[in-house]
Image (cartoon, helix red, strand yellow):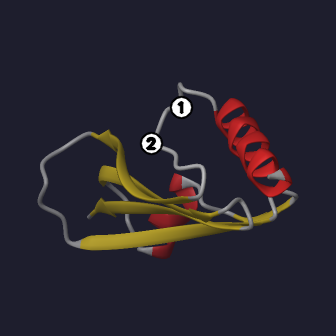
Amino acid sequence: MKKIGLLVVLVSLTVMLVGCATPFPYGAFYTEIKAPVAATGGVSYSRVGTAKSTSILGLVATGDSSIKTAASNGGIKTIKYVDYDAKNILGIYGEYTTTVYGD
């Protein structure tokens, strides 16, 4: 009975900490999404660049997932559109990638 009570408390705390309004869909236990960030031109492009950041335990985050770095990594001078990918497992490990498409 104590285990069930503890589980209910943990689930309730998780729901309260996660909140309802986020800019992107977020799962309390697992998240893997692709979302748009910006579009300035047509959907045709000749180059793709990516930049990535990681997070461990929600305590340490490293990397550079900026649009500028992604464009530079792809040799892009004119940005057509930008996408954002997020993957997070229980808040233990997260990967965040910015993908830039352009010429």
Of residues 95 and 99, the one drawn nearer to the viewer in this rendering: 95
Against 19, residue 63 (above or below) is below
Residue density around tag 2, few if under 14, some if 14–19, many if 20 or more, within 10 Å = few
Residue 51: name its quadrant. Answer: bottom right
Q: Is residue 52 left or right of residue 37?
A: right
Q: Are marks 2 and 1 in contact (CB under 8 Å)?
A: yes
Q: Position of residue 33 (x, y in %)?
A: 41, 57
**95 to the left or right of 78:** right
Tell me if residue 28 comes above or below residue 69 in the rendering: above
* Numbered tag placed on residue 22 in the rendering: 1
Given the image, on which type of amino acid does mark 1 rest? Thr
Disc marking residue 1: none
Decide: is 32 above or below 14: below
Identify the residue at image location x=50%, y=74%.
Answer: 73
Q: Which mark is drawn over residue 25? A: 2
Provide the secondary structure element on which disc 1 rests: loop
Q: Is residue 63 left or right of residue 21?
A: right
Give the x, y percent position of residue 50: 47, 70
**Callout 1 crowding tier (Cα within 10 Å): few <14, some 14–19, many ≥20:** few
Residue drawn at x 53%, y 31% is: 22
Instruction: Please identify the residue farthest to the front as the structure is shown.
Output: 1
Work out which residue is located at the far top of the displayed protein and give it: 21
Q: Nearer the viewer, residue 103 or 101?
A: 101
Q: Quadrant of residue 29?
A: bottom right
- In which quadrant of the rendered view does residue 20 lie? top right
| Structural distance between the alpha carbons of marks 2 and 1 | 7 Å
Q: Amino acid at mark 2?
A: Pro
Residue 83 horizontal/vertical position (percent): 37, 54
